[in-house]
Amino acid sequence: MDNAVATLGGKVYSFGGTDGGSTYNKAYVYDPGAQTWSALPNLKVARSAPQAVAYGGKLYVFGGWDTNGWPVDKTEIYDPATGAWSTGADLPKPYAGAAATALGGKIHFVGGCTYDTCGTTDVQVYDPVSDSWSSGTPYPQSISWLGCGAIANKLYCAGGATTSGTTKHAYSYDPASAKWTPIADLPIDQWGMGYSAADGKLLVSGGVTDGSTTITNQGFAYDPGANTWTALPNSNNTVYRGGSACGFYKIGGSPAGWSAARNSELLPGYDQCVAIPWLALDKTEVTLQPGQSVDVNVSFNANVAEISQPGTFTAQLVISAKTPYRIEPVPATLVVNPPKTWGKITGTVTGIGCTDTSTPLRGATVQITSKTASYTLKTDENGKYVLWLDTKNNPLTVIAAKDGWASQTQSVRISAGEATTVDFSLKPDRACT
């Protein structure tokens, strides 16, 4: 129970948690295709009741209680491409039992608990690009153990535990106005429930209700367009304080008190997990009579925070209908070309061992520093890295480093429209024996 769960690349990740006695630094990944769980490298800090958010191909773990019950301020970042953990900027106000979700290129961390008190109006905003925190507009009520999700450029939050009990109140947050607005209340009060945003709806399931006296398996979906909640199928397991993520997956939890469960379950049909910031539709729901047709206009926009590099970006338009027949998804592709003044720096980092054998170094750190900014990259499984930059950043200082190897530094200038290759051959940082 009290584990953090997120989905990324069709897989389900679970971090930390407790069995009711011990607090864990364990991490696992579930492959729905193989229907198997696998262990991942451990978190550096054991924590229970943290939050996990998938963003930009990586998984971010925030907050939680440590083994002594103190809130954890360390931010840990897992990269599935390299299989390695790194650290981010510390959480300014560490909390456990909060809610977290990505919105508009930033991660919002809402509410939470301290060592001995649950409930705060604090909203903390993390920018993955600059690796920095800022304060958001305070939540309308002191809150913890709530459910939040991002839908169509707004943040929606519902339920939770207040300093005086359990609430059914819900709110939306618009970054354009930086204001919270009340929306339709949940049908029942809930806290410690599973939550996610999927298919344009905020989903909540399970948790504690009836004034903190009853653990429930009821669930509800909020439709922002109609400002209404509708019932979801009851979950198979009646638990609270488990992990949850888009899918709609529910992992672990407790059926009572501190009795942790190994259960995992899925409510199918809610697998559209990530809002595509560069793609927009002029309509998302239509009603057709026999023989009728309708046009759906699709627009593309590369000028969003999530696109900072040239490349090819793909998505699928999934069409759901009340029919027994499968409707094939419609592919959507956006090709972003580099500006004319940009050049590419790329290369391979290899390690030259004591036997003079050369091996690509996966997960090596490549730091590229210009006159105005610094960029930190990780090499892929082939030891490669790549970054496009405006030539006005010249000259560049490039440092390649990895634990167990002596770092190297090179100076380079990039040319507009061209690729500049900078390779590194690192040697062991200790004498060969």
Image (cartoon, rainbow, N blue to C red):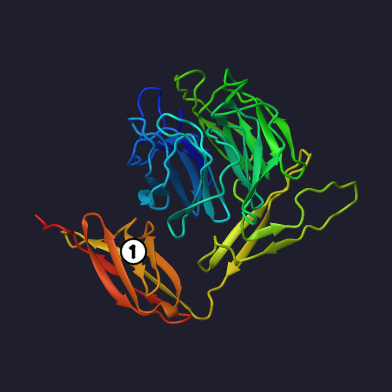
Quadrant holding the C terminus: bottom left
Instruction: Depth check: give the residue in front, 40 or 173.
Output: 173
The answer to whether residue 153 is seen in the rendering is: yes
Residue found at the far left of this picture: 433
Camera-side residue of 426 and 44? 44
Residue at (51, 43) in percent of width and height: 122
Q: Residue drawn at (65%, 41%), measured in percent from left and top?
A: 171
Q: Is residue 328 left or right of residue 193?
A: right
| Residue 243 horizontal/vertical position (percent) | 50, 33
One can see residue 248 in this view: no
Q: Is residue 378 above or below residue 237?
A: below
The kind of residue tagged 1 is: Val
Where residue 416 sits in the image (x, y, percent)? 46, 81
Residue 166's place in the image compared with 142, above or below, is: above
Q: At 62% from the left edge and 61% from the top edge, which residue is drawn?
A: 278
Please count the marks in the image.
1
Q: Horizontally, is 294 left or right of 14 in the view? A: right
Say which residue label 1 marks.
Answer: 366
Give the quarter of the image for residue 258: top left
- For label 1, the SS is strand
Residue at image coords 47%, 23%: 261
Indicate the position of residue 236 as horizontal and vertical percent values. Answer: 60, 23
Answer few, some or many: residues within 10 Å of disc 1's Cα (few below 14, many 20 plus, some between 14 and 19).
Answer: many
**Res 183 → quadrant:** top right
Looking at the image, which is closer to me, 108 or 290?
A: 108
Q: Position of residue 221 (x, y in %)?
A: 68, 35
